Image (cartoon, grey):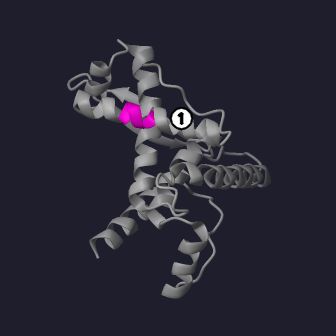
Amino acid sequence: MMKLAARALLALLLLPLLAGCASRPGGDDLESYLQRIRADGMTESAYGSLMTVASLRTGWSTLTLEKDPDTGFYIRSYGSSTCDVPGADPALIAAKKKELSDATERELRRLRPLADFDGSGFVTTEEGSRFRQLYELALTAAHVCAEEECTVQALAGATARPPATVEESLAGFRTLAQRAGALRIRDFPALPL
């Protein structure tokens, strides 16, 4: 029951970010919901995690990192690149949103095998979350290294995580990046440290 509530909360939090997404197939009954999850090859939460990464990669959404001067922690802020411009042609806006939605859905499908850490053919909630965390860590590392000292200690302070945990996550990302290369996902971020 707790996982279901967490999924519902995640879905509500992602709605503004993913406004304009193509509807996902399925009805309101439990059987069609379960069929959709099986067809997607991932849980609903994993879908949300992969959609976040895919939308960053296609430019549909943006990630901004801002350092809190008191704590040194970098605060993540997500934005949309599809905000309507007053006076713009609604047909052009709709076409652009559709183009980004389609590209993001394709990117999500391309990333799905990469997020399937155990090779089971199904991306669990935990795998989806891990994939998103590792990807965002690489983006954070690139930002921190451009702004200040490029060390594990600096990254640990920027993410409010112990250095040993950061080291472990960096190793996990390196493995993920190798798998991305094997899957011919060439535009995967590089770690600066």
In the image, taking residue 158 as reference, residue 43 lies left or right, namely right
Question: Magenta: predominant secondary structure element?
Answer: helix
Residue 162 highlighted magenta (yes or no): no
Image quadrant occupied by the C terminus = top left
In the image, taking residue 99 as reference, residue 9 lies left or right, namely left
The residue furthest top is: 149
Give percent across and percent down for residue 172: 41, 37
In the image, taking residue 83 as reference, residue 12 lies left or right, namely left
Give percent across and percent down for residue 105: 65, 55
Image quadrant occupied by the N terminus = bottom left
Q: Nearer the viewer, residue 100 or 163?
A: 163
Does any portion of residue 160 appear in the rendered image?
no
Q: Is residue 98 above or below residue 86?
A: below
Q: Which residue is drawn at the image coordinates 32% and 29% (left, top)?
A: 167
Number of residue marks: 1
Q: Is residue 158 above or below residue 98?
A: above
Give percent across and percent down for residue 145: 42, 17
Q: What residue does disc 1 label?
A: 177
Residue 170 highlighted magenta (yes or no): yes
Amino acid on which disc 1 is placed = Ala
Which residues lie in the magenta part? 169-173
Categorize mark 1 by other alpha carbons within 10 Å: few (<14), some (14-19), many (20+). many
Q: Is residue 43 above or below residue 178?
A: below
Q: Dividing the picture into quarters, in which one does residue 59 lie? A: top right
Q: Which residue is drawn at the image coordinates 42% and 29% (left, top)?
A: 140
